[in-house]
Image (spheres, helix red, strand yellow):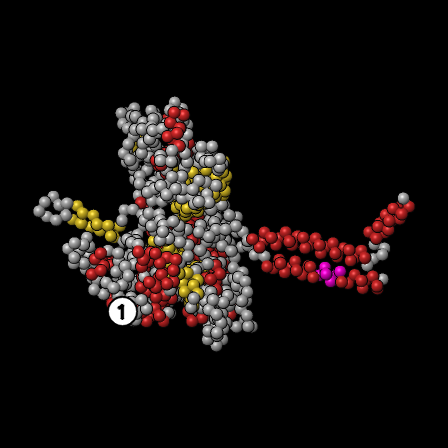
Amino acid sequence: MRTRITTAIPWLALTNVIAFLAAGLVILLPIPAAGQTVSSAQTQTKPLDARYDKGGTRYTASVTVSQTTDLVHQKVKVSWSGLRPTTAQGTYPVVIMQCWGKAAEVTQQTCWNAGTNVGTQRLGFGLHDVLFNATDPATKAVFGDTPSENSVVPFKARDDGLLYNGWQSSEGWGKDAEGKDKVTKTNPTGFSVATSNAVMPGTYVGRTGANGSGEHDIELLTEFELKHLGCGSTSPCSLVVIPVGDPHCNASRDAQCLSSASASLRNATTWMWPTNWSRRVAFDLSFRESPEACKLDDRLETGLAGSWYAYQLLNNSWRPKFCNDENLFKLGYTALSDGDARGLFGTALASTWQDGSTNALLTSRAMAGEPVKPFVYAPVTVSSVAVSFILDAPDGTKEVTELKLNARLLAKLFTQSYRTTAAAGAEHPALKNNPKWWGADPEFAALNPSLAGLAALTREGSEYPVFSIGDMDALYALTAYIAADKDAVAWLNGANDGYGMFVNPWYHHYQLPVGLLELRDDWVVTDERSPFKGEKLLGQHANTADNINVGAVAATQAWPTAFINRSCTPDPDPAKPPTCVFKRKDQRQVGGQRAMLAVTSLGDSKVYGLRQAALQTAAGKFVAPDDYSVAQALRGTKLDEKTGVLSTDFEKLHPDAYPGMSIVYAGIPTTGLSPATAGNYAKFLDYAAEPGQVRGYAAGQLPDGYVPLSEPLREQTRNAAKAVREQKGEVPPPPASLAEDPAAGLLPPVGGGGGATNGAAGGGGAGANAPAPGASPSASPTGAPTVDKAATSVATRTDSSGLAKWVLPGLLAIAVLAGLIAFGAMVWTQPDHPVRRALRAAADRLRRS
């Protein structure tokens, strides 16, 4: 027996090794967030008709929409393959529209084709599309009572049922019983630059590349942006994608119809022709319950006010959840500039709290001074400021997906130091030798060499980023990054940038950080020939917005907010000059010519499908905001022991950490609240610490652009919830784990014995998270990130981990192999094992036979 056991030992050892490897691979597998929503991306394929084919090639369209459920006002990405390449003349494009109604029910009339106008011009069936049947009732419903090639297709509004045509034609539709035109020959009231979202000329073109594939984002509008579509949680809508191709023509005109010279027969304006409409691929869209649901909740509201960082989370996700859940409460949220919110909360602290009023603050910075009443700072979410952009390559053929900026470039953008693309800018006494705009800045080209061609282009209205005119913590975070950079500070103090550009003297020795940016330059144009005569040129070119969410929407739509469009009204008295005013331009930047920057929250940037610039963190190292880089920034913080608030310590940031991270805290009183109100606020904090950190698109979940709270931050919030519920005036100290590792649970433990990482304990030097002296600035931190993978943005959405796809089948195979080896070893070491006896009996039978 001993000999058999000894012989089996190597096999048993091999079994253990294989089992160990299997366990190791399990550890390496990405761990999804609990309850993470499965992607709602949808793909459809459709074989196209023979007329779309060319030269014997048969085309099958494959179209994917990145998200189709739990939608809000946002962008989604539409990508396609298997189509004919779009020509330089614009033939064979792809048209994309948002429509009301289910995908199986939409018609040309229910699609919002807003570009230049709503509705279509005359059909122009000069060669007679044979699929056009003028006697068919379905044709008459779309093209009019007397359909012909002169007919128009109006838009039928969902809200009032009226037919509209902005081309001021009702051809083919006749009169109603009262003798009035059946078609209202104007655009509906909801038509504007802000609602012109269709992917079609003259704003956007859906182009297919030489390989038959392409992609384009489309902004989806809810019922609150566009009542005529009325898309909401109870009102179905759809997305229609139309590959435009050759029409079916009568035999007598067929040769002419197929002639490549007839570009007008196969461009985007023919999307409504029966042949092209028959090629459509339609997707059902469902929208998330909106915060308007709270208006139907008759419970007394318990509210918070402040942080625009929290807009996508609080307003669009948590509020609908709370107001529809009888176990929670009616949650109020008023987004305010952070400075105003802190001021109002400070005033309220000196008053008596009232049920049903807003008794809590949302902020990323602690209030100055001693509070008159005790309150806690409880972490709600982790996010960041983003320099968001939408930018087309210099040749206009593709969208730029990566951008690098440093602190000095940001300083230039915030100090009115570009002379603008207006001719009058060359006369500015202090700026005439500075570049016209950031795209023409040699320093920008040095960081982004592939975009050097922007210097030769003019992007009117793009000279400066869109930024909020309020006192915003997002601006404070970004200007703190500038203030921590010695080269940026030297430039603000008058140094040359190395390319001959100097700071606008109005900002010389500009003291940063600030939450409220200023427009200091007051130089007035005096040139009689300039349309800006008598105006402060740089003030007119400033892209300001009421808040960072509005700024994000402006960038999404590539619609500068600068007041540079001059409009004049003649005076009734010919002897008097006209009255002229400046206003925002009345059109978006055209696809292929877009160039906009905006200071936004990461949450807004993600939901609107914008890209985020990477900021320089060390020599040659640029970091964009994502789950890992934002979580890494938690370790480069300092802790205020009195308030428990973390703030960035730039000297201790790891090069892989994003320098614009911010934590949103709820400031809630721990005395003076009624039991009901205190209980509601405690529920809010309990929710924020647990179910509110589950990733997904559904109401109540954590949207993209927000990083889950770390374990120490959750503990801090749970402690705060207890103090708020009890209302004894206590302010619990920050948990010890917050000083040890603020990112615990999001990132692997810090090496070297787990020393202090945020300066609250230990030597207070560079911190355990800082790179070792002499280390490469681009070196990655030790260990793999364990941050939960976010539901990614329209710009970055991908399939699930490739590692998991291959490792899981491998694990099954390893497990089977280990089991067989272990079983074999057990049988070998036991002569009387039933399997051994059965094998001997079978061998005896074979010998006898």
Name the residue at 43% across, 68% down.
618
- The residue to which callout 1 is attached is 508
Q: Residue furthest right?
A: 848
State the image coordinates of residue 245 (x, y, percent, origin top left): 41, 36
Task: State the image quarter where residue 173 is shown.
Answer: top left
Residue 85 visible in the picture: yes
In the image: residue 816, left or right of residue 247: right
Task: State the image quarter where residue 181 is shown.
Answer: top left
State the image coordinates of residue 579 (x, y, percent, origin top left): 16, 48
Name the residue at 29% across, 46% down.
587
Position of 203 relative to 726 (above/below):
above
Image quarter of the N terminus: bottom right
Q: Residue furthest bottom?
A: 763
Asked whether 417 or 561 is in front, the reply is 417
Asked whether 75 or 365 is in front, the reply is 75
Task: State the image quarter where residue 241 is shown.
Answer: top left
Name the residue at 17% across, 55% down.
533
Asked whether 404 or 359 is in front, the reply is 404
Position of 714 relative to 237 (above/below):
below
Name the residue at 55% across, 72% down.
752
Image quarter of the C terminus: top right
Q: Main secondary structure of the magenta part?
A: helix
Q: Residue furthest top?
A: 135
Element under label 1?
loop
Give, as a single range, the part of the protein colored magenta. Answer: 11-16
**Amino acid under disc 1:** His
Q: Is residue 14 magenta?
A: yes
